Image: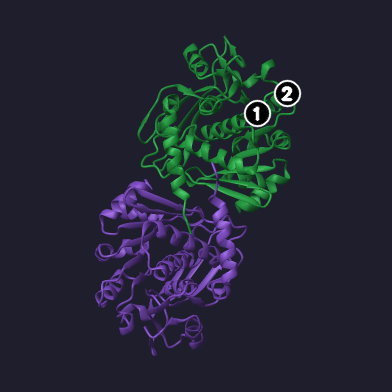
Chain colours: A purple, B green
């Protein structure tokens, strides 16, 4: 089986949406990425850190889905990273109510020996120094390195972020972040500038408006499925990244043509994620539901002129 | 040749964008619709009104493109409708600086006799009472009536608007307007509610994010082409409507499958409109440019999974 190495947070989230609110529930970029990638036939491992307060059942749940958790360090006298946020009525803007870094503050990632030769590396949203430290531990040159990041790191750690951006093949960011990183308003021009920073492929996520994939003069657009209801957007971007990298790891084909398919798979899986609070939907989505919805994606943009 | 009847404003616009500004130039919904539909092999006529200040050369320009202008009333002692607006840096929000209704204030539309049996009727953005008055003059039941409108009429003439909405087959509005009209945030639910008001087809325009076509349980998405530069968005929605209705008039096929194609043609033509101030680009776009860009649209969403 192809190996997919995932780095990112494993965390507690408390979420408030117009539909309700949760206490501390399972969250974190690497959790969503791992759950999403688990829908493909890949051997994946998560590199992360949690505190002594993190329930064993969550680790078991990941292991049940064939996600190797030996790279998740447990700091028994520490507390797990905690994030709390609140979504507006339109679900497009969110306010961060609390961020407690806890064990993340002094996290030194350690890549398990049997994943140092992973073919695909998915650097989930996390401090760019941690993402860099993971790349430094790889024995082989991975076939593909995908980086996800956000405006927060552009604000407080731009030099470290640019350092890691130099080394990756694909970057996934949202439209506002692409504008912030490049200083360009037009997404086409922004994608061009970002390619000059290192990544040969730029994925711009536009949430309910779909996602764009840029590579040299080529561009591909994956729509988002129009949903009757978005219950909780938390983790949708990570789920997208997990589907994208998981599919590429499984197929072992990083051509532009296959990246288009990966983009569709990512969008498809993300459309489930938002249907329930937190990871709930991703924990029980079935393969037949996934393939049914893939057909809906197909018919959404198919025409015969 | 198939007949397309167009109603809408023929006007002067003064536009300010981050790239520059114009004095009074040719504008108006019907102007853009006519220019856009002229790219198909249809016999079209515009019903509108202008003042004595309206230059003959603009009417000649439309006639050169086989647009029948005999339904454009000239009120020699009146002034042409004038609109002035200013776009923000992001080109997504605009401020209206001036609206002078002038001859529009007491406009009684008169449909030319030879267009009372038009197969396709495109009711461009205008007071819903005028749109209604045009429908009342038709001798045959048209094959398809398409209505374009905007939030302005929802604010000041909702009862008249709902009256005309009842009678049309297709409505084209933007996402915010769909939400305002339906009272629903989800575009899927909004489209469902709007179908209950009369139109069997609902087109929701999302500007740079593309357009959605809803019909019963079916939905189709036409992307917008990612452009390096948007110079002036004025008239893009009208150009879209002109491409949509012009293509349907020409092909004489109002199946859902063919409406998908019409949506792509509308998006394609709108992508040219925004490249220059006002109608400039639409006055000189060539058929080879149009077909070249259609291929770019195709590859934008095409994948083989």
Q: Please name the residue that numbered disc 2 is placed on.
A: B138
Chain designation of label 2: B
Residue A114 vertical position relative to residue B73 in the rendered view, above or below? below
How packed mark 2 is, by other alpha carbons closer than 10 Å (few <14, some 14-19, many 20 or more), is some
Residue A219 vertical position relative to residue B97 in the rendered view, above or below? below
Chain designation of label 1: B
Numbered disc 2: secondary structure: loop
* Residue at image location 61% in from the left, 65% down from the top: A19
Figure quadrant of residue A47 = bottom left
Residue B141 vertical position relative to residue A123 in the rendered view, above or below? above
Distance of mark 2 from mark 1, alpha carbons? Answer: 10 Å
User: x, y percentage for residue B124?
Assistant: 60, 30
Numbered disc 1: secondary structure: strand
Image quarter in which the N terminus of chain A is found: bottom left
* Residue at image location 37% in from the left, 45% down from the top: A186
Residue A298 vertical position relative to residue B126 in the rendered view, above or below? below
**Camera sees residue A17:** no
User: x, y percentage for residue A129?
Assistant: 28, 71
**Camera sees residue B291:** yes
Image quarter in which the C terminus of chain A is found: top right
How packed mark 1 is, by other alpha carbons closer than 10 Å (few <14, some 14-19, many 20 or more), is many
Q: Are marks 2 and 1 in contact (CB under 8 Å)?
A: yes
* Of B101 and A183, the residue lying toward us: A183
Asked if residue A147 lies left or right of residue A23, the reply is left
* Of A53 and A261, the residue lying toward us: A261
Tell me the tag on residue B121.
Answer: 1
């Amino acid at each position: 089986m192809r190996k997919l190495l995932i780095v990112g947070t494993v965390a507690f989230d408390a979420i408030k949406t117009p539909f309700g609110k949760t206490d501390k529930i399972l969250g974190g970029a690497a959790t969503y990425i791992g759950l999403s990638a688990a829908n493909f036939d890949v051997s994946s491992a998560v590199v992360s850190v949690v505190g002594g307060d993190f329930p064993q059942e969550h680790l078991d749940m990941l292991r049940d889905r064939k996600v190797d958790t030996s790279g998740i360090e447990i700091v028994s006298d520490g507390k797990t990273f905690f994030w709390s946020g609140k979504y507006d009525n339109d679900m497009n803007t969110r306010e961060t109510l609390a961020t407690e870094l806890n064990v993340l503050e002094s996290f030194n990632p350690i890549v398990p020996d049997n994943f140092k030769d992973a073919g695909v590396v998915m650097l989930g949203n996390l401090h760019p120094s941690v993402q860099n430290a993971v790349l430094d531990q790889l024995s082989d040159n991975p076939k593909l390195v995908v980086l996800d990041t956000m405006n927060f790191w552009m604000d407080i750690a731009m030099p470290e972020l640019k350092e890691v951006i130099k080394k990756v093949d694909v970057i996934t960011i949202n439209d506002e972040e692409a504008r912030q990183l490049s200083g360009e308003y037009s997404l086409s021009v922004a994608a061009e500038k970002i390619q000059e920073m290192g990544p040969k492929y730029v994925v711009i996520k536009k949430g309910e408006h779909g996602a764009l994939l840029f590579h040299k003069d080529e561009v591909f657009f994956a729509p988002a499925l129009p949903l009757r209801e978005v219950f909780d957007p938390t983790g949708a971007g990570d789920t997208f990244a997990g589907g994208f990298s998981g599919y590429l790891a499984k197929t072992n084909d990083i051509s532009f043509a296959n990246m288009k398919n990966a983009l569709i798979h990512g969008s498809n899986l993300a459309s489930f994620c938002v249907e329930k609070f937190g990871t709930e939907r991703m924990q029980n989505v079935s393969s037949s539901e996934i393939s049914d919805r893939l057909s809906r994606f197909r018919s959404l943009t198919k025409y015969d002129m």
